[in-house]
Amino acid sequence: MSMSTDTLYIDKELSWLSFNERVLQEAADKSVPLIERVRFLGIFSSNTDEFYKVRFADIKRRILITQEQGINDGAKHLLSKIQSRALKMNQDFDALYSELLLEMARRHIFLVSEQQLDDHQKPWLRRYFRQHILPHITPILITDDIDLLQFLKDEYSYLTIEMRHHDKTRYALIEIPTDQLPRFIELPEAKSKRRKTLILLDNIIRYFLDDIFCGLFEYESLAAYSMKMTRDAEYDLGQELEQSLLEQMSEGLKQRLTAMPVRFVYQRDMPSEMINVLSDLLKVSNFDSIIPGGRYHNFKDFIGFPNVGRKYLENKPLPPIESYHFAQSRNSFDAIKAQDILLHYPYHTFSHMTEFVRQASFDPKVISIKINIYRVAKNSRIIDSMIDAANNGKRVTVVVELQARFDEEANIEWARRLREAGVHVLFGVPGLKIHSKLCLVTRKEGDQFVRYAHLGTGNFHEKTARIYTDFSLFTCDENLTNEVRQAFAYIENPYRPIEFDHLIVSPKNSRARLYDLIDREIAHAKQQLPASITLKVNNLVDKGLINMLYQASNAGVSIDLIVRGMCTLVPGIEGISENIRAISIIDRFLEHPRVAVFGNNGDPDVIISSADWMTRNIDNRIEVGCPIYDPKLKKKIIDILQIQLTDTVKARILDKDMSNQYVARGNRRKVRSQMAIYEYVKYSERQLKKQAEKAIIKHDSTQPLVTA
């Protein structure tokens, strides 16, 4: 590997922008239902916000630190590349938004501005404004001594108001109160029942500016321009030993609320004087992204864009599939005792998971429940069951990850509620996030203690389980359940000496175990034996693991990668990665499982995991990977990965140019993998039912006939 580092690895930030470009491709794809295309604009916008809060902010910090030290690590050059790519994507976004507005109009859906209201709608809107919107509007006057950073909320859209009186100009800010009110309001329509008209909350406020300011201020003219600011999402945890992690996290969140901005987006035709005043007050530096934009910001609200038109304008619902093993059993424990069960969300219903913990919360045989939560739904049935279990006298331990980015506040609140209910709440240790997806239920069955475990790739989150693809394994295999028990002990004290023979646990043994598994494939290839690796992750950026994959490719190991997000590995480099093929799939569900299949000369090892192949997941978080031992379940996972590798509709090629070309279909049949997997899961469950029915008939036919 004598090539330069620049050739071997793609910058992860540029790779992340390339992923978001794939999201934008979905908004541009005419085969996607129209309203879903509009919603993809919202997903793109939400992703962009997170990019600036986290990745862009990190580079900015790097520049400031290296400047202090007089070092040039290339961060400035990277920042410049990011800004030019982000600007190009913003232009594509604006063009696409205009195109989609026209497409909606062709289907009798109109998103109007305040200038396009008809006489029938104006009186109705005035009443709506006074009753529902005005109580939430309090302008903030901008003066030289105002601390704009102190009260301006991150990720909120604002209208900057210009009031002109003679030769004097005053400025004020109005927050668009989307936390209190819907962003899209449907207007009454007199012309035709077919015609549907929506207006943005921003535009209603623009229309009634006079109602807000008249009688309190003197002015000849009023004008409004939109703006938005994004803050650095990092925070420093306090070092005070007497402070609990809960207190430190609360303190850290307060810091984030007043953290420095990393992006300032303003309406393109905003007067330059207004831009200068805002930039000064926001202390925007040369390294921040100052972006001229359209009339609206916070497009993330478009994720929830309402379909007021025909049903065909959004995705046809796919009813979640019941697991035959769970559905036909008297209870969850009987089902799991009979065999390991693998669920694949959102194709399978998540209700099997919520039912598992609900039954555990009142089953008299259950003596304890342990679970670790990273993100949960707003009205979480999982949390409710933990509280119910504690009320029923079970020993309940909930590990709450307070450092789950952007969910910290919610998790602090959950921790308080659980503690009040008598649940034993653990937080782990600062600097070591707990990202595993474990649940362990212990039952006393006769004289024995029997453990039932859940190990998964996704969060215990009812809402995201309907839109994220993930694997969940339910097992009472003692090899695995004993080690899940040890994993909880490890979470409680990461410095305790514990060995894992079956589970792959970060930061304990993940790197060593993954290196060993890749080494074994290299050894097989060198012996001219079949050698292959199939890997599906959200992000592949760890250089150590990438170098191992390069070595494997060079030795002749066939490697297939399915990477949703960042992939800094470069496939197809002669003599280094020519045996590596990488694709990314973006479709109606967000691809979220982490799965690795190592060929092992025809006897494959299949591992599902909570960990991406990123340095933080391998070395700096508690993550758990679980081997799949049941041959039928192994085959299912391998089949599902093969369906994805043959996708000819939604798969994009990952290459050094980050061109995001769709996989060429050629003369192959159309395979849209997510829809094909849904049919595969449905067929598998039907087959299980048929086999069980055949077994019952066969069993009945062997019974002797009873004659009179």
Image: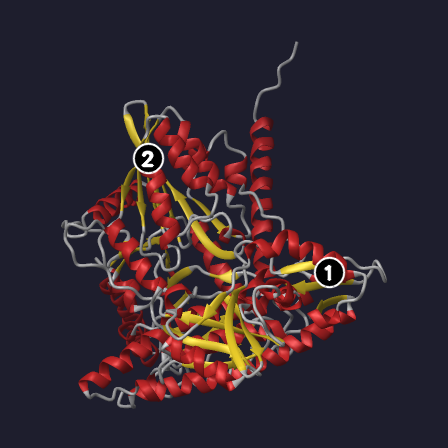
Q: Decide if residue 14 is in sight here.
A: no
Of residues 290 and 656, which is closer to you in this image? Answer: 290
Residue that extends furthest to the right in the rendered view of this protein: 191
Q: Is residue 676 above or below residue 576?
A: above
Q: Is residue 337 above or below residue 84?
A: above
Which one is earlier in the sequence, the residue at label 1 or at label 2? 1
Asked where in the image residue 561 lies, by quadrant, the reply is: bottom left
For residue 420, the mark is 2
SS for callout 1? helix
From the viewer's perspective, is the residue at label 1 or at label 2 nearer? 2
Q: Residues within 10 Å of mark 2 (few under 14, many from 20)?
A: few
Picture mark count: 2
> Disc 2 residue type?
Glu
Q: Position of residue 636 (x, y in %)?
A: 48, 54
> Disc 1 residue type?
Tyr
Which residue: 29% across, 78% down?
551
- Report the Cα–Cα distance between label 1 and label 2: 47 Å
Q: Residues within 10 Å of mark 1 (few under 14, many from 20)?
A: few
Asked where in the image residue 133 lies, by quadrant, the reply is: bottom right
Of residues 162 and 296, which is closer to you in this image? Answer: 162
- Circle 1/circle 2 CB separation < 8 Å: no
Asked where in the image residue 504 lies, by quadrant, the reply is: bottom left
Image position of 375 (left or right of 703): left
Of residues 167 and 573, which is closer to you in this image? Answer: 167
Q: Position of residue 547 (x, y in %)?
A: 29, 77
Image position of 203 (left or right of 653): right
For residue 312, the mark is 1
For residue 33, the mark is none
